[in-house]
Amino acid sequence: MDARLSCTASGHAWLMTLSDERAMELVSRQGFGKPSEYGPNAPTTLKALLGFLHAARVRGYALIDEVFAPGMSALGAPVFRRKEVIGVISIAGPRLRLSTEKMHELGNALMEAAAELGPISNASTLFGRPPLGKG
């Protein structure tokens, strides 16, 4: 199954850091997921997706409920190094255990974890830096 930007908490977490115009450009290029292939709440229009992104920007994290798959919920937060997004982190699970209320309870902890990861990413070669003592 493709992880489309329009249908994943990680996709929404990244898109929320972009301008509406840039986010729509990327999603339009990739295409929307169809609710028959994803979850019943998968956005199928730019207007619907913008609703998700605007809400995510206000909260500080993305939240989806039956968007990627029926019965699945997820939330995601961008990881910044300085002012550059270098990744996202997410929590996902069955909506029976990961209700909307539970996701809101976890939202602050997710944002705190994302805030910790950005600054420590300088120590990792995964983000384009040479290993210490080389280069």
Image: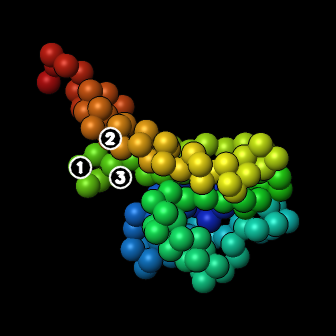
Circle nearer the viewer, 3 or 2: 2
* Circles 2 and 1 in contact, beta carbons < 8 Å: yes
Element type at marker 3? Answer: strand
Q: Is residue 26 above or below residue 129?
A: below
- Residue at x 67% of width, y 44% of height: 92
User: Which residue lies under the disc numbered 1?
Assistant: 82
Q: Is residue 1 above or below residue 16?
A: above
| Of residues 41 and 36, the one drawn nearer to the viewer in this rendering | 41
Q: Amino acid at mark 2?
A: Gly
Question: What x and y, as percent, mark residue 108?
Answer: 48, 48
Report the disc number at residue 60. none
Q: Is residue 119 left or right of residue 48?
A: left
Mark 2, Cα crowd under 10 Å, few <14 / some 14-19 / many 20+, is many
User: Which residue lies under the disc numbered 3?
Assistant: 85
- Residue at x 46% of width, y 69% of height: 58
Q: Marks 3 and 1, Cα distance to the nearest angstrom?
A: 8 Å
* Circles 3 and 1 in contact, beta carbons < 8 Å: no
Report the disc number at residue 118. 2
Res 44 seen here: yes
- Residue at x 35% of width, y 52% of height: 85
Element type at marker 1? Answer: loop
Question: What x and y, as percent, mark residue 35?
Answer: 80, 67
Q: Is residue 20 left or right of residue 12?
A: left
Q: Marks 3 and 2, Cα distance to the nearest angstrom?
A: 9 Å
Q: Amino acid at mark 1?
A: Arg
* Earlier residue among tags 3 and 2: 3
Question: What x and y, as percent, mark residue 49?
Answer: 60, 74
Mark 3, Cα crowd under 10 Å, few <14 / some 14-19 / many 20+, is some
Res 28 seen here: no
Q: Is residue 28 left or right of residue 118?
A: right
Q: Marks 2 and 1, Cα distance to the nearest angstrom?
A: 8 Å
